[in-house]
Amino acid sequence: MNIEQEISKLFEEGQYELVIKKCKELIPSEKLNMLYLIMGLSESNLQNHLGAIESFTEYIKLECTDISGYLQRGISKMDLQQYESAIDDFTKVIELNTFYSGGYYWRGVLKFEIKDFEGAIKDFTALIKLDPKDFSAYYFRAKAYDHIQFYNKAIEDYNKAIELEPNSADYYFNRGLTYYSINNYEKALKDYLKTLELDPKHSFAYCNIGCIKHSSNEISTAINYYTKAIQLNSTIADFFYRRGLAYYDIGAYKNALDDYNKILELEPDNEEVRDCINKCLQELNEQ
């Protein structure tokens, strides 16, 4: 077994600290550029992203036309939220290999993250041309379209993503959000229910069904859905806020007050909820 095979075997076994130690020992004497790459990957897997970036940078100095160094360095920068610099690395990947879909994918994800939605759409469109069956590209492009209020295009892309990957709860949930945005509550409800079929612990789907039931004056049913959302995730202030509104609408002011006070525990600076508390106290005092 040669040195490369030995290091690769240790990496595959997940012995990342040992890989790093051996690479550091070997680098001064061995003219193996890949040692920097595998050391960077090991550091990345150990969440030492700064160390990973240093290793990938050394690899790039030696192998400036290999996309691997730029790609991995970009991912490490992304993990450190160095988005603009990461985008530069992914752009370099694309310049070196315009047919490699990963460069467009990661750059598109980051452009979405920095709210460059039109730029994200361009990258995911390029990715789809390279790989028309990449369901994640349709999904992210749909989300970008959603943010610029191109709702019909968003729904078309969600439809395609679901056609290619029909078991993703998030795809149905996000399509439901888009349907809700265009006031198609019937289709939104159907998507939220499908979300729960695929992921019974999706708290936001329960909350959003509650919103639909609340808007149709099915308040008791809405409260049940809000309560389920809270049972699954009691750290989301909006769940308590919406249930509080529902309780207020049926005159259950004490219950509403309890929910609003819970919001203040989660968000002490929430001034809007203080107004809601005052309204509840006023109603209780008048009883």
Image: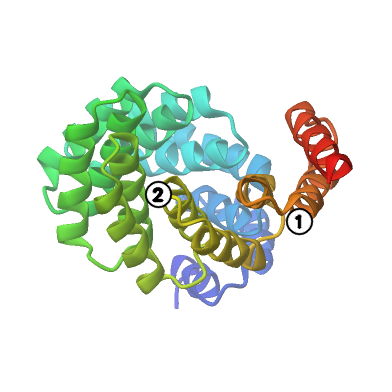
Q: Amino acid at mark 2?
A: Ser
Residue picked out by circle 2: 216
Q: Is residue 273 left or right of residue 163?
A: right
The disc, 2 or 1, on the residue closer to the chain's N-terminal end is 2
Q: Is residue 59 left or right of residue 177?
A: right
Q: Amino acid at mark 1?
A: Asn
**Residue 147 x/y as whole percent:** 36, 28
Q: Is residue 199 left or right of residue 225?
A: left
**Residue 15 x/y as whole percent:** 62, 72
Looking at the rendered structure, the secondary structure element under dot 1 is: helix
* Dot 2 crowding, Cα within 10 Å, few <14, some 14–19, many 20+: few
**Residue 99 x/y as whole percent:** 16, 38
Residue 101: image tag: none
Q: Is residue 185 left or right of residue 40?
A: left
User: 262 and 233: which one is in front?
Assistant: 262
User: 44 and 239: which one is in front?
Assistant: 239
Name the residue: 22% across, 65% down.
Answer: 166
Looking at the rendered structure, the secondary structure element under dot 2 is: loop
The vertical placement of 45 against 128, above or below, is: below
Name the residue: 10% across, 38% down.
Answer: 129
Residue pushed farthest front? 287
Residue 255: image tag: 1
The vertical placement of 228 against 82, above or below, is: below
* Dot 1 crowding, Cα within 10 Å, few <14, some 14–19, many 20+: some
**Residue 71 x/y as whole percent:** 41, 40
Q: Is residue 134 in sight in this rendering?
A: no
Quadrant of the drawing holding the N terminus = bottom left
